[in-house]
Amino acid sequence: MRRTTFLFVVCLSALTAAAQQPAAQEFNFAANQSVYVIAVKTPLPQDPSIWMQLHRNNTRPPGFIHGPASSRNDSERATLERTPSERTTLERETPLRRAMPPTEPQLKKLVEEEFLKQKKFRLADSPETADFIFFAHGEYTFSFIQTNGRGSGVVLFGASGQGDTNMELNTLARLNLAAIPAAEYRKWQSDIASLFEKAKWREVAWGEVRNNPQFSYQEPPSKKLVQQFHKQALKK
């Protein structure tokens, strides 16, 4: 009888202690929080459907142009997709460590300048000192201006050239943005797929090839998307 009573008291004490522990707080955006901007750069996948998206408002878009094969293997490219084995790993809440894609200083600077202009959040010096991470994943292709007898226009290649692929990717085609609580970033770090899953705000924008009347190209509106984030994140 004494043993039964003792076990009951121990269990009751454990339940009481668990109930008294503070629950994990839900992250919410608030003015004057600190943000750290991370911008990375990867090649745009060679996919005809993506090519059609870039030419979405042209009645007769040009054919899909494949550039030289990249020197990197597809398995080395960090995208928002993941294999079935990766999905199984993430379901077990085990961080997947991989190399972060190359950084994109120009995109980072553009995003930071818009944050400074909005004056709603403070820029942090490092991810460790930030309340949340603003992650910009840019997918780039290669473009150049071609001149012929009918005038000049932009030509997009669906892949980068040989050698240093990061140097030859000069045109932002698709921009993936996410605002991620710093605690989630520290947990998942370079696993881009999980980072975007844990985001409290996400947006994807495409560039566009226009025929007006010559072919020109407009990149995704990075600054407008940052403005959109401010409006939506701080909306009461």
Image: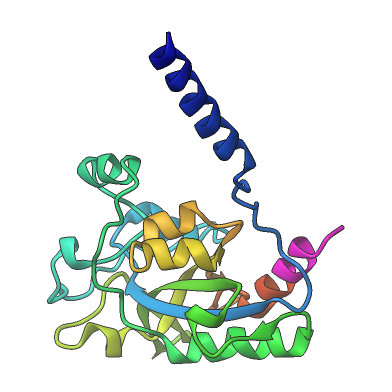
Q: Quadrant of the C terminus?
A: bottom right
Q: Looking at this view, is 11 or 61 the one in front? A: 11
* Above or below, comparing residue 83 to residue 224 in the picture: above
Span colored in magenta:
228-236
Residue 6 versus residue 153 in the image, above or below: above
The reply, left or right, for residue 107 in relation to residue 101 is right
Q: Residue furthest right?
A: 236
Q: Is residue 206 left or right of residue 7?
A: right
Q: Which residue is at 12% across, 76% downward?
A: 71
Magenta segment: does it hold 7?
Answer: no
- The one of 128 and 17 positioned closer to us in this rendering: 17
Name the foreground residue: 202 vs 71: 202
User: Which residue is nearer to you in this view: 196 or 1?
Assistant: 1
How far across and down, in percent of the image, does residue 3 sit? Answer: 39, 16
The reply to whether the magenta stretch includes residue 233 is yes
Color scheme of the displayed model: rainbow
Query: Is residue 235 shown to the viewer in this render?
Result: yes
One can see residue 54 in this view: no
